[in-house]
Amino acid sequence: MTQEFYVKTTVPGERRFNRRDFLKMGGAGLAGAALLGAAGCGGGGSSFDGTLVFSNGRETSGALESLIKKFNQQNQDITVKWRQAPSQSEQYFDELRTQFQAQSGDIHVMAGDVIWPAQFAANGYILDLTDRFTDSMASKYLDGPVAANTYEGKRYGVPWYTDAGLLYYRKDLLEKAGFSEPPKTWTELQDMAQKIQQDEGVKYGFVFQGANYEGGVCNGLEYVNSHGGSVLDPNDASKVTIDSPETVAGLETYRSMVETGVAPQAVSTYDEPTTEAPFLQNGDAVFCRNWPYMYSLAGSEGFKVKPEQIDIAPLPAGEGGQSTATLGGWNFFINAFADQEAQDAAWEFVKFMVSEESQKEWATVGTYLPAFASLYDDPEVAEQVPTVRLAPTALEMTEPRPVSPVYSDMSLELGEQFNATLKGDVPPEEAASTLQKQLQGIADQAG
């Protein structure tokens, strides 16, 4: 049975909406989405013919393609087609939401960000999996990812892998410059980067994801959180707390990466793939912030830097703060509008993908952090996946993005202000003040 892959493309001349236009069209956040119709179980869509459409973004290691091929070979009645989604998660989110609001069952099962379950579940877009993803099954996975898929006491997703921002560094360059360990603070990172830039003629000191998109929000929050700032009151999610001296200090450090010349001005346009090029492909950067997946690219075709030249560490701490990384991770969801037969087939695929055997291949080939708890004690995984060695420390220091059913609306404003600050268009104090008003307004409107 052959495996098929295809990518959605934009029809020439088709009107393109940015994310803000989309929200205006559909109403703000949860309230607007709800007006467009509540979902039911096993709703619209054509009759299932055995072809299961799975939506997921870019995957560079080949692990996903290999696992889909194995599933197809083992299941003669089901053929999984991978429909490649946009790499940037907020574009992917909007694509899925468009499908859901149209009550389309065209996509049967999808991988999705750890921040999506609350909003999708609140609108009835994804299937309640509580009876399938039982307590016994859930007990085999890390607690955090399971909790992220739980909404009002029910489980709507199954963890696939977890994620945390990491500091990659050229250990060969640090050793040559006389540094015995990676930086513990953002100030140390700047000092070390500038010295190596000057002494070794390295083009960039530090690269990261600074563009106006969800990845840029994750990066910006790491500066805010590592300086002791916060977006929401941990005891009251309706109360916004971002306008604080700690937030301002974090954003000042964020902007200083460009002001000091440690990071290039163009970093304000970088996403994950753009960040790979200067650090791994060309060897033009000393430090890089990225997710665990990037380790698998070192030494592969087209990438100049070899695995033995790099190492990983927790992200630096802010002055008076501590090291924090934005919690990431992806999960499997089943479309509530797909027909019953498609939902049943989707569950078979999900079970295969989250099995211990599949999770082990996913971790060792793709260098992703598994959601299956026992794999962190597996010697083979620890040996083949350097990121797993750091995982317990990194995951312990993670901070989730603001937990709110209207987070997608908040993310728009966070991304815009973080990016404007990084570029030097908006002072940190003004960004914090603006965000306080914008985010509180969103929280109040949501009730």
Image: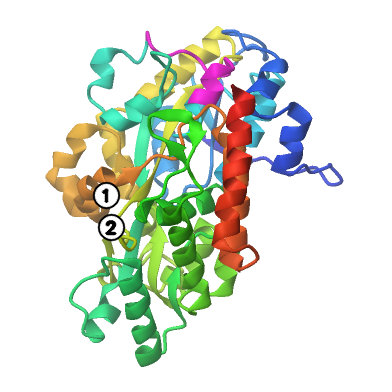
Could you tell me which secondary element the residue under label 2 belongs to?
Answer: loop
Name the dominant secondary structure of the magenta segment. loop
Amino acid type at mark 2:
Pro
Label 1 belongs to which residue? 394
Label 2 belongs to which residue? 314
Please provide percent x and percent y for residue 361.
Answer: 29, 41
Q: Is residue 94 left or right of residue 222?
A: right
Label pair 2/1, CB-CB below 8 angstroms: yes
Please provide percent x and percent y for residue 369.
Answer: 30, 44
Amino acid type at mark 1:
Ala
Say which of 379 and 89 sits in front: 89
Point out the stretch of residues depicted in magenta.
118-131
Q: Is residue 415 visible?
A: no
Q: Residue at x 60, y 54 (%)?
A: 417
Give the answer, above or below, for where 267 lies relative to 323: below
Distance from the alpha carbon under mark 2 to that under mark 1:
6 Å
Q: Residue at x 47, y 71 (%)?
A: 257
Q: Residue at x 23, y 21 (%)?
A: 139
Q: Residue furthest right?
A: 13
Q: Is residue 142 visible?
A: yes
